[in-house]
Image (cartoon, rainbow, N blue to C red):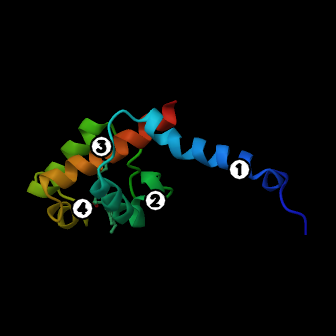
Amino acid sequence: MRLAPVLHHPQQLFVLLAGLLAAPALVSAAPIPTRGVAWAQACAACHGPDGRSQGTIPALDTLSPEDFRTAMRAFRTEERQGTVMNQIAKGLSEADIEAVTTYFAAIQSRRRQ
Ligand code: HEC
């Protein structure tokens, strides 16, 4: 089996990898808090990868950061009644909500570029 052409030139592969690693730092102004990433992975079980839900569960990637934050707070205080989200939102602190809001805002702004 022949290797992909790029592997014949390891220095090119290095340049490619370095570019990929540098890219996220260039497009996002605010760093994404680690706990925002961790929470978003937990949400993906129902809301799909990066909030792009395909099913009946609402997508998260279409909400503005303001609406996202407001929804999470309302679920937490039970001002808004859901089936599962009240319980889930109660597991997040205010800082967790900020972190996961920042995460979804950052992936949205990356997609717009
Ligand atoms: C067990 C499945 C499940 C998980 C896990 C889950 N959600 Fe949800 N989410 C739902 C469902 C179902 C709804 C619709 C409201 C309801 O019934 O509770 C919803 C609604 C929402 C909404 C409101 C969307 C809108 O359009 O108003 C937000 C925001 C949200 N979820 C955020 C999150 C975040 C953030 C996480 C991860 C911390 C998360 N969800 C994890 C099932 C889930």
Instruction: Tell us which disc is closer to us: 2 or 4.
Output: 2
Q: Please state, as top left, top right, bottom left or bottom right, where the N terminus lies in the image.
A: bottom right
Left or right: residue 109 compared with residue 71 = right
Residue underneath mark 3: 102
Instruction: Tell us which disc is closer to us: 3 or 4.
Output: 3
Taking the view exactly as shown, the residue that stands out farthest to the right is 1
Q: Quadrant of residue 104?
A: top left
Sequence order check, earlier mark of 3 and 1:
1
Sequence order check, earlier mark of 1 and 2:
1
Q: Hey, what amino acid is under mark 4?
A: Met
Sequence order check, earlier mark of 3 and 4:
4
Classify the position of ligand 1 by quadrant: top left, top right, bottom left or bottom right: bottom left
Residue underneath mark 4: 85
Residue at coordinates 71% horizontally, 50% vertically from top-left? 13
Report whether residue 80 is seen: no
Q: Hey, what amino acid is under mark 1?
A: Leu
Q: Hey, what amino acid is under mark 2?
A: Gly
Query: Which structural element holds mark 1?
Result: helix
Q: Hey, what amino acid is under mark 3?
A: Thr
Give how far apart the Cα atoms at labels 3 and 2 are: 17 Å
Sequence order check, earlier mark of 2 and 4:
2
Give how far apart the Cα atoms at labels 1 and 2 are: 32 Å
Instruction: Tell us which disc is closer to us: 3 or 1.
Output: 1
The location of residue 2, given as percent across then percent down, is 90, 64
User: For the residue with label 4, is its CB less than 8 Å from the closest atom of ligand 1?
Assistant: yes
Left or right: residue 32 compared with residue 110 = left
Crowdedness of circle 4 by 10 Å Cα count: few (<14), some, many (20+)?
some
Residue underneath mark 2: 48
Left or right: residue 23 compared with residue 34 = right
Front residue of this view, candidates 15 and 53: 15
